[in-house]
Image (cartoon, helix red, strand yellow):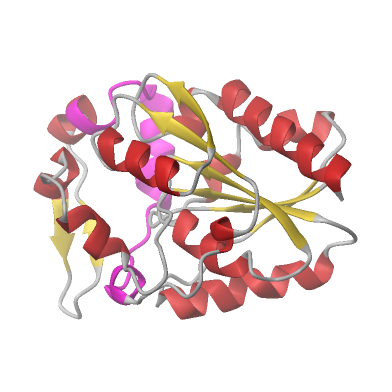
Amino acid sequence: MDIVLVHGAGGRPTTWSAVEPLLTALGHRLFTVTNPMTSLADDVAHTSAVLSETWGPVLLVGHSYGGAVISNVGRDPRVKGLVYICAFGPDEGETVNEIVERYEDAEISKYMRRGPNGEWKSETSPEFWAEIGPDLSPEQRVIVEAEGRKAENAIFRQATGVPAWRTLPSWYMVADDDRTLRPEIQRDMAERMKATVEHVPGSHYTTLVWPQRVADLIHTAALAVGTAS
């Protein structure tokens, strides 16, 4: 199965670093993207371009904001399924901001800083790690800090088109201790998209903390959509 892995607003290559070797060992062909994070439309276009490199049916996987990207890219007929890892699954006409604004602020809001042009980036500190990513090792924290990139406000405020999860089979992994994207938001989105749901404990850094669980869910989805295709 060809699998396209899409990062979140942090834009870190290490998002999938622990998951990739596990999926490769299972025989999947992987494609990772590093989106510009200048707007949702730009990121959708950038990820869509990767589909031209695939050979057959495609499974899209998104972490965090990457879920908004795959919800739009998934309209391509080559895509057969979607996997959301504590990710956004907006409905038609809905933005990422509109989703989070319906709920109590997540703890991450205390550490988000806005740049002079409206861009966003989290400000890490010992307090940040203790609250937001307590399950990352010190070595992982150093890498995450070094690779963090800013995200333009437009990725959060541009509306989604007709979401692919309306017609494609979807899987969703909920991080039950997530203080970046509140778990109740994740549960509500997963229920709305009628996804197959799996729960893990831990923070928003699910792909680094639970790589085997993430790989297993992606593999399960790949087998399901591959057989259907």
213 lies left or right of 174: right
Residue 4, how many percent across, how many down? 69, 54
Name above or below for residue 177 compared with residue 226.
above
Residue 34 visible to an observer of this rendering? no
Name which residue lies at 43% across and 51% down.
Answer: 147
| Extent of the magenta region | 131-157
What percent of the width, then of the height, locates residue 120? 24, 64
Asked where in the image residue 152 lies, by quadrant, the reply is bottom left
Q: Nearer the viewer, residue 44 or 227?
A: 227
Residue 141: within the magenta? yes
x 75%, y 34%: residue: 23
Answer with the quarter of the image where residue 75 lies.
bottom right
Give the percent coordinates (x, y) of residue 104. Answer: 10, 44
Relative side of 144 to 221, left or right: left
Q: How many marks?
A: 0
**Does residue 165 appear in the picture of this structure?**
yes
* Side of 84 where 20 appears, left or right: right
**Left or right: 64, with 116 as reference point:** right
Q: Is residue 86 above or below residue 193?
A: above
> Quick one: 48 or 229, which is closer to the camera?
229
Tell me which corner region of the image, top left, top right, bottom left or bottom right, holds residue 219.
top right
For image coordinates 48% across by 72% down, the residue present is: 36
Spot occupied by residue 14 in the image (x, y as percentages of width and height): 53, 43
Instruction: Work out whether 229 lies above or below 16.
Output: below
